[in-house]
Image (cartoon, coloured by chain):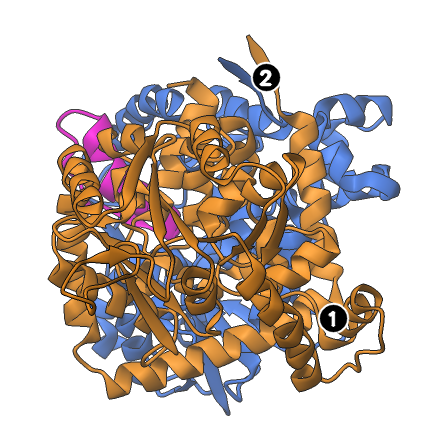
Amino acid sequence: METKMPAVLDIISDNIIKHGNPLALKGSETAAWAKGLDLPVRGELLFYTGGEYQLLPFIDSLVKTITHIDQGSKVFSMMMGVRNMLNKAGINAEKIYASVLAKDKERYNSVCFKAAKVLQGLGYEFCYAGNKELYSGALLYELGYSKDMKEYAQKVVEVVKKSGAKTIVCLSPHAAEVFKFVYPKMVEGFNLEVLTFVDLVWQRRAKLARIKFSGAVVIHDSCRLARELGIHQELRDILESVGVEVKETPRSREWTTCCGGPIKILFPELSHVIGARRVNELKESGSEHILTSCPYCLSALEGGRAKEDSAIIEDLIEFLYRGAEA
Amino acid sequence: MTVDLRKDFVDYAKSLNSACEDTNIQKAMTRAVGSYRDTVAETMERFQHTPELAREVREIKSQSVANLDELLKQAMASVERNKGKAFYAKDHQAALEIALGIIGRNKTVVKGKSMLGEELHLRQYLEDNGNEVWETDLGEFILQLRKERPMHILSPSIHVPREQVAEVFSKFFGKEVPPDIAEEVKAVREFMREKYFTADIGISGANVVAADTGAMVIIENEGNVRLATGAPPVHIVIVGIEKLVPTFQDAMKVAEVTWRYAQYGIPGYVNIVSGPSKTGDIEKVTTYGAHGPKEFYVIFVDSGRSEMAKQEKFSQALNCLRCGGCMYECPVFQVTAGHFGHIYMGGIGTIWTAFVAGGMEKATPLAYSCLRCGRCVERCPMSIEVPAMIGELRKRAIHGE
């Protein structure tokens, strides 16, 4: 039995397979943040962005643009064929990309830069595949395109292999999850050590400079990080090392509440409701400064924050960069 | 053959969105989630052996699911030994026909809450065949009057506030019922009391079945199941074959874990029924049909369950005790209630939808609305890996089997 699924799924999977990125962003675009850092392409430790932070503003823009085309039935247009609707409305994909706010692009692109700087500050030396880097394929796996994933994973591994690295450090827990749990089943002889940004920082947390910060933060544990990878105490240890107080919400660590991000593309309204509820739940901790460590959480919580809400949502990378900068 | 699910996704998204905007659902769910978490935390504190017992039950259930054929044979023999009659229904249609064969037409039926009943659309079927059927569970009764489907497996009318209950009751009873919960409960009690004692047949589900003894364990709080299964002359149990465990002792363990994770220290009532009522008080001659039912029937329903049991990647879904705990922890269910579901609800319900009640067409949109966040696994006493199974379902939606 063949099933016709919402077109947005095909578009995303096609993009990953053909362009190595869910929204077909160009390698030169996803690697732009690294200009001037002169990172080598070969080394023991591979710095891996997967283009994920970089594509966040584009996802939001895609959702917003489609909402704009047909207010009456935005869901309808999402489902019935994005490409089709976009063409009819005289909007092409390039325009969606062009409509991304420069400040959003700037912010999300800079996360990678900041992560690199924080790690360098801790004395890590690493390489980066630059515009050759491919997205991990996590969404292919997530959305059920397992056969495509299997093929695609081989391509990703080729790029990774060229670095000569023994360890890969992922900024996104989603990438870390697939490298750690899915790749070994799909790619023969895949035996790279898979770590997250959080792991590396935690290992050398004693070297972190204290961060001048008044007040306390609250941690939004990412589902993948906390439940799949079992990383949650590490975040608290890191913040303790930089001298920042952490307030807790009862729904934290392995009981954390999802940000709503995973269903953003197919069920944007529901995703938004879940994100908004999570922001409020986190604020009940007594802190309005929310830290997370996952690109999709970051974006979904930002999206869920009400316009007039004074809460601040940052990635741990952004927060730690304050210390690295000082 | 091509199945176009694009419109299904659209309709489903609309239904989820309207649920998010429904203030009744939001109010009721917020209250329900808060009280569930508080009560469970308190109950687990009091009965600290529960997680360990749950681990034991996980083993009992896994082995039972792997051994369903044998357990079914044993259980059917036990029921017959107890002077009951046991049936095996391969699919929904067979189950309905067996039930109708026992019941006949122009009868009055009182029914306890049963998800299998929902799966079979049993009430509808019996009504269509000229019977009068009453849902005796308060929540189900409200839905019967409102012609709606359950929004939670344990609290089916979770989305209906007292004002709306008063409205539908006033209309149905033909007298003013105030929006006061105690008054509402009283009105139903009066109405239902007469039904129990005039009904021809009582129907219930069962939470666990012990194969060695043929004991049906039915957990409840309202007391409706006692009456519905005790007062009429005939008692029919409809139960999925996944509820079978080897021994009576096993059944007790399963039952305790089930109610504990459904937030009860101990439920109001635990019914154990194994056959028709009997007495030997006159001359030690065993005579059937004493105060309780004279006839006792059990319909074991398969309908996709044994197929599911054979599939390595999905068989653990049959370990589900239906405690409902996962639903309270699900971020999607918290804002949409039973809209995230077909007959069975939430992430685990999506797996059940695929195999047992609805098929892949109904299950696919549900599968894509699951966040795969995994908090249900944390709560689940059986640690059922719902996100992994949802992933498998998606794979099937994209690539076929």
Q: Chain of mark 2?
A: B
The residue carrying mark 2 is B3
Q: Is residue A163 visible?
A: no
Q: Measured along the vertical axis of the image, is residue B7 above or below residue A221?
A: above
**In which quadrant will I find the N terminus of chain B?**
top right
In terms of secondary structure, where does tag 1 sit?
helix
Instruction: Indicate the position of residue B105 as horizontal and vertical percent values.
Output: 59, 37
Instruction: Indicate the position of residue B25 as horizontal and vertical percent values.
Output: 67, 65
Q: Is residue A264 left or right of residue B393?
A: right
**In which quadrant will I find the C terminus of chain B?**
top left
Q: Nearer the viewer, mark 2 or mark 1?
A: 1
State yes or no: discs 2 and 1 in contact (Cβ < 8 Å). no
Residue type for callout 2: Val
Q: Is residue A178 magenta?
A: yes
Q: Is residue B330 left or right of residue A237?
A: right
Q: Which chain is orange?
A: B
Instruction: Indicate the position of residue A18 as horizontal and vertical percent values.
Output: 49, 19
Chain A display color: blue
Q: Quadrant of residue B9?
A: top right
Q: Is residue B304 magenta?
A: no
The residue carrying mark 1 is B165
Residue type for callout 1: Val
- Identity of the residue furthest to the bottom in this view: A214
Q: Chain of mark 1?
A: B
Q: How many marks?
A: 2
Q: Residue at x 25, y 70 (%)?
A: B256
Q: Measured along the vertical axis of the image, is residue A2 above or below residue A290?
A: above
User: Toward the viewer: B219 or B32?
Assistant: B219
Range of the magenta residues? A168-193
Q: Quadrant of residue B352?
A: top left
